[in-house]
Image (cartoon, grey):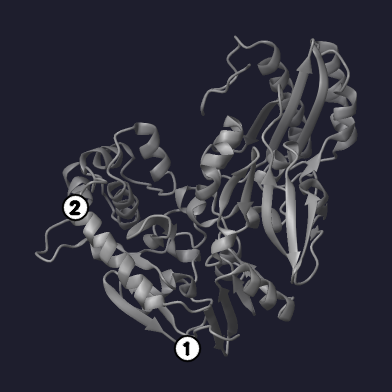
Amino acid sequence: MTNMRSDIRFLLGNEERRIENIDPQTTVLNYLRLDEHKCGTKEGCAEGDCGACTVVLGEVDETVPGAMRYRTVNACIQFVPTLDGKQLLTVEHLKSADGSLHPVQQAMVDTHGSQCGFCTPGFVMSLYKIWLDGGEDDRGAINDALAGNLCRCTGYGPIIEAARASGGAGINDVVEQSRRKDVADRLKGLVGEGGGLEITHPRGRYFAPRSSDKLAQILVTHPDAIILAGGTDVGLWVTKHLKRLDPIVYIGDVADLKSVEVRDGDVHIGAGATYSDAHGALGDIAADLGELVRRIGSRQIRNAGTLGGNIANGSPIGDTPPALIALGARLVLRMGDVRREIPLEDFFITYGKQDRAKGEFVEKIIVPKPAGSSQFRAWKISKRFDQDITAVLGAFAITLENGAVSDIRIAFGGMAGTPMRAKKCEAAIIGQPWTDETLNTARLALADDFKPMTDMRASGEYRMLVAQNLLTKLYIETTQPGVATRLVGKAVSHG
């Protein structure tokens, strides 16, 4: 492809790196430890779960002149070419020229937040991101930032205190803002105005276009390519399944796929927008949708994973599809210059099969806001609250008029080979008074919609009972607003 570079350019701390002739599946973690000999970044799980490999990535914020955006990610499932045009910061880069500890490191010492020390560098980098954002005192916000870092010896109390004690850079810190402007200028000069990356290596090819038009062109030429977004799923194909991926087409540098826009009340989310990018807009659509996104993986995972990827991989336990189906979301698919728009529910055909042709890609998701008096609820059921795979996810959009159900859309994940609407259950409810009798009929109808499987997450019988009980929970929340139904999470208006 013309106007595409073959060398990966980024800043490692403040040092420039230009890398050629590297296996494009090399993880950032292995590169740091084996090539750069920076062994502070640890390997624990190799799947983005434990947080021992947490690093901070900085990118130029194109919306604010001279500004940078920083995020924590898991180095174990990020591939080295995705560093192009970014600044990579590890625990080694927190050391001052005079050898003194960074405030977050000193806070960990002062509060006795480290014991065996294996997980400590990952915790420190998550704390560093809090520091970069100006510090944090709210316990809930700190818990959320640290949920992707696991510790088995110290306990989280001292680490939470370290987060509070370390302070922050402050958005008005002149020295910090000057540093960020310098980094942004260096990154822009380093990358230039090229058309992205094209790497040819004996162990695989890698493309990273910067526009959706170039992306469409590459995928027409390479229709069997593996599309890589955040790597939160594809990265495990390499680290756990030891697969060779060739070619890889990375969409994380495609600027027009990363947009999140509100148009006429609908939210248009590019397939390359991360969960973190889309979180606020989705929470504005419905509080439960925002809370659902907050429970997807960890902060590191949400900073890398994308809504488009969650949909495109077609998992029957993907967290966002059932909620988006209940809301009536639509999908825009593109092949070359041809686009088509379909209801999201029609995208999932059967287990492992989606309505997407070779060379076609998900371009964006359109999520409508619930109309009028429609109420939305969504609940994820898993063995643990944070960072866990879903057993059952139920999503409901219901409209009540004069005590009767004038409309309802019900979708579940974990109940079939695909995310799926409960159409027989819906038919048993629509037009009926919203009463105990209707509820009981609808609970029985769920058994006609689904025959859930038994696996390591849950038995089929458990899944059916949970789905029926979520329907009951919907009934209680929409008819008895004084009854407490939630132990955790954001409060939801029962209007």
Quarter of the image for residue 112 reads top left
Residue at position x 56%, y 74% in the image: 208
Residue at position x 83%, y 21% in the image: 406
Residue situated in front as seen by the camera: 201 or 317: 201
Q: From the viewer's perspective, tell me whether residue 223 is left or right of residue 35.
A: right
Q: Work out how far the residue at label 2 is from the one at label 1, CA to CA, in angstroms.
A: 40 Å
The amino acid at mark 2 is: Val
Residue situated in front as seen by the camera: 267 or 392: 267
Height in image: 359 above or below 268? below
Quarter of the image for residue 57 reads bottom left
- What residue would you read off at disc 2? 174
Residue at position x 50%, y 48% in the image: 276
Query: Who comes first in sequence, dot 2 or dot 1?
Result: 1
User: Which-is-in-front pick, marks 2 and 1?
Assistant: 2
**Residue 87 image offset from top left, x and y in percent:** 35, 67
**Residue 366 image offset from top left, x and y in percent:** 69, 47
Residue situated in front as seen by the camera: 225 or 337: 337
**Residue 174 image offset from top left, x and y in percent:** 19, 52
Q: From the viewer's perspective, tell me whether residue 150 is left or right of residue 453.
A: left
Instruction: Work out which quarter of the rendered image holds the N terminus and state it.
Output: bottom right
Secondary structure at badge 1 equals loop
Residue 384 makes an appearance in the image:
yes
Q: From the viewer's perspective, tell me whether residue 252 is left or right of residue 227.
A: left
Residue 294 makes an appearance in the image:
no
- What residue would you read off at disc 1? 21
The amino acid at mark 1 is: Asn
10 Å crowding of disc 2: few (<14), some (14-19), many (20+):
few
Instruction: Work out which quarter of the rendered image holds the C terminus and state it.
Output: top right
10 Å crowding of disc 1: few (<14), some (14-19), many (20+):
few
Height in image: 159 above or below 97? above
Residue at position x 55%, y 88% in the image: 201
Residue situated in front as seen by the camera: 208 or 41: 208
